[in-house]
Amino acid sequence: MVPNKLTFTPLFRQALPVLKQLTDHGYEAYFVGGSVRDALLGLEVNDIDIATSALPEEIKEIFPRTVDVGIDHGTVMVMVDGEAYEITTFRTESTYQDFRRPDSVEFVRSLREDLQRRDFTINAMAVDETGAIYDYYDGRADLEEGIIRAVGEADERFNEDALRMMRAVRFSAQLGFDIEASTELAIKENASLLEHIAVERIHIEFVKLMCSQARAKGLKSMLKTKLFEYCPELARNKLALMYLSNHEGDLQSEQQAWSLLVHYMNFLMPTNYRVDIRQFLRQWKSSNQVIAAVEAIVSGIQKRQATEMMDPFDIYQLGAELARDVEYLLTLIDGSGRPDEVTAMHQSLQIKSQQELAISGADIMKLTDQKPGPWLGDVLAQLVEEVVYGRLDNNETILLAYVSEHLI
C-alpha cells in the first residue's frame, strides 16, 4: 500500500530547512520527482530534488551560498550545512524542435503547471514540508498498480524529449512495472525519434536497464516497441536481446552487462562470426576501460567453457575482479561458474603482478654481460609463469639460481 503521506527519512529531514527557508520567505517549495517516487515505494533515496515558486534571482537572495548550475532553465544549487541542493523554479516549456531540449522555458508560480511537464505520473508528485503529497496526475494510483503512464498525451511527452521512451523501458526494468497500453503504443509509434538523441544518453539508460532486477521486462518492452532498432548495432542482434529477455539473473556492473550481451551475440551468430567488441562498444561511446574489460571477460568465458576450472595463469592475467566476472556470468549462462573458488585461487597466488616478483630486471642484468633487450622481458615473463603455477617459490635466491641455470 502506497502511503497517502510521506514519512521523512533522514535525507529528507536533513533537507527540510531548505524548504522552510523558502516558505518562510513566502514562496512555495516541495520535494519532487524520483526522490518522492522512491520514498513512497520504500526504496533507498540518494538525491533530493526541490521545486519552488521562487525565481532564480529570489532563490539567490535567500541563500548566501549558491552556484548557477542551470540558471537558464531555473536551476540553482544552494549550499546549506555543507550539503548541496538543486532548487528549480516552477516552469513550463515551449516546443522541442530537436526532440531533446525545449526551445525556451517560462517560469511560473503554479506547482500544477510545473508537474504537468514531467514525463510519467509516478515522477509527477510533490511533497511539502509536512509530508503532504500533491498528486494531480494520479501517480500514487499508478504506483499502487505498478504502471508507467505518461503525463497527459504520451505523443507530446515523447516529442518533447525522445529519451523519455528509453526512460520508460528502464523504469519498467528497475521497478518491475508494466508500461500502460497507450504509453507503450506511443513509444512504438515514435521509436524512430530516438535517432535524434545522443548515444551517450541512450547508453546510460540501456546500462541501467541491463543492470536492473527486472531486466527481462525492460528488454521485452524494447523489443515490442522496436526501440532496439534505433540503438547502435542492436537492430541486427534481435535474437540476442530475445534470448536475454528470457534470461534470469542479476547483472552487477556495466562490464558484466555488455559482456553477457556480446556473449549471446556471438553464440547466436554463425560459427565463424565474432563481434568486434571494440568497434561495437565505441559506437555506444563506452570508455576504453570498459571496452578492455569486456574484451577480457568475453575471451575468458570462451576459454573457460572448454574446461572445468579456470587455469591459475588465466586467473593471474585477468585479475580478481575480471576472473570473478567470468565465473559469475558462467553461473548465469550454463550454471558452470565457480566464482568463490576462483576468488580463493586468486588470493592464494604467490604473486598478483610481475612487480611482486622477488627479483627485478636489474637483478637479472647483474648475472650477465648481455645488453638489455626483449630477452629480459621474456625472462621475467617466464619467471612469472613458473611462480604462478607454483613450480618455483617466489624467493630471491631460488629465482636467481633458476635464471642462471635455465634462462641466460
Image (cartoon, rainbow, N blue to C red):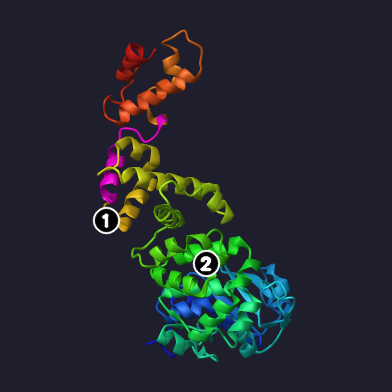
Rendered position, 153 above or below 219:
below
User: Is residue 259 found inside the magenta-colored segment of the image?
Assistant: no
Looking at the rendered structure, the secondary structure element under dot 1 is loop
**Residue 305 as seen in the image, left or right of residue 82:** left
Residue at 58% x, 73% y is 191
Tally the numbered discs.
2
Residue at 25% x, 46% y is 341
Instruction: Answer with the quarter of the image where residue 136 lies.
Output: bottom right
Q: Which residues are magenta?
A: 337-354
Q: CA distance from mark 1 to mark 2?
A: 28 Å
Looking at the rendered structure, the secondary structure element under dot 2 is helix
Task: List the residue tagged with mark 1.
Answer: 335
Q: Earlier in the sequence, mark 1 or mark 2?
A: 2
Residue 224 can be seen in this image: yes
Q: Residues within 10 Å of mark 2 (few under 14, many from 20)?
A: many
Task: List the residue tagged with mark 2.
Answer: 228
Q: Position of residue 25 (x, y in %)?
A: 66, 85
Q: Position of residue 19 (x, y in %)?
A: 58, 81
Residue at 56% x, 60% y is 232
**Residue 299 as seen in the image, left or right of residue 341:** right
